[in-house]
Image (spheres, rainbow, N blue to C red):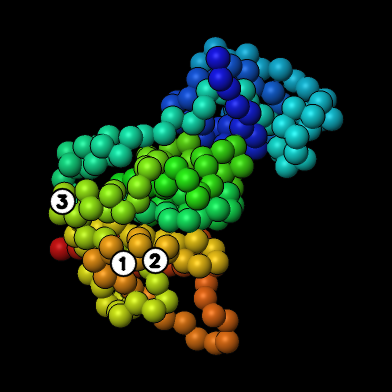
Amino acid sequence: MKTEIIYGIHPVFEGLKANRRKFHDIYIAEGKTNQRVDPIAHQAAVMGIPVTYMHRQKMQALTGLDTHQGVAAVVSPYPVFGFSDLIGHSAKNPHPRFLLLIDNILDPHNLGALLRTALCANMTGVVIPKDRSAVPSPTVSKASAGALEHIRLATVVNMVKTMDELKKNHVWVVGLDKDGDRSIYENDFTGDIALVVGGEENGIRPLVKKNCDFLSFIPQHGPINSLNASVAGAVAMYEAYRQRQCMGKH
């Protein structure tokens, strides 16, 4: 039986709330009782999950880290969605589809930050490649403040073929690129949209970029060449979110 260890207050609590993983055991550091940890112990009791109170040094040995915040859990692996499941779910949604395609993001902290924003911006789902990408690991769950536990995340073998499939399903593919021909504030993000965010160093890979319907940039000022990948993704996602919220009010 394959398991992994998630750690941190938010990942464990959000994992319990999402109820998408099987929880085998929860560990809490001895003496760690406060208004942030107590709900975890309470929810575990409600769900019949064993809770063990453990010395902090043993907790560090269990997780291999000192950033566990006094909480860890042995759980089933992250339940990745199939791309067809994600599209099928979206087709039943009366609202236009709003997908995030993350290409070539290798830093788990950047991936976690993007997933956190995607969840808050009400994205339909997120797609990452199986290769050349950070994976949905416990580190990503921690970096996302537990958003990974709720987000609909699919992995695909070939991002370009995935983009072609999206186009067949009437989804416009917009690449975020500093050399794009229009700013994000000139785009109409109110329809069925897939936003492509590229990696930390080189952005979107050339073949992926070539297959976008169009490229869009974030206006910026000053001597710094570009924004951090997760920050750039957040700016673009929230411009799209703003437009879509305004559309819903009319």
Between discs 3 and 1, the one toward the N terminus: 3
Foreground tag (3 vs 1): 1
Foreground tag (3 vs 2): 2
Q: Is residue 193 above or below residue 3?
A: below
Residue at position x 60%, y 27% from top?
A: 4
Compute the Cα span from label 3 to label 2. Answer: 21 Å
Question: Where residue 70 sits: x, y (%)?
Answer: 73, 33
Q: Is residue 248 visible?
A: no
Tag 3 residue: 168
Question: Where residue 84 sits: x, y (%)?
Answer: 26, 37
Q: Is residue 236 above or below residue 67?
A: below
Tag 1 residue: 210
The numbered dot on residue 36 is none
Q: Is residue 88 left or right of residue 139?
A: left
Tag 2 residue: 206
* Residue type (three-letter) at the residue carrying disc 3: Lys
Residue 63, quarter of the rendered image? top right
Between residue 205 and residue 120, name the one nearer to us.
205
Between discs 3 and 2, the one toward the N terminus: 3
Residue at position x 58%, y 16% from top?
A: 24
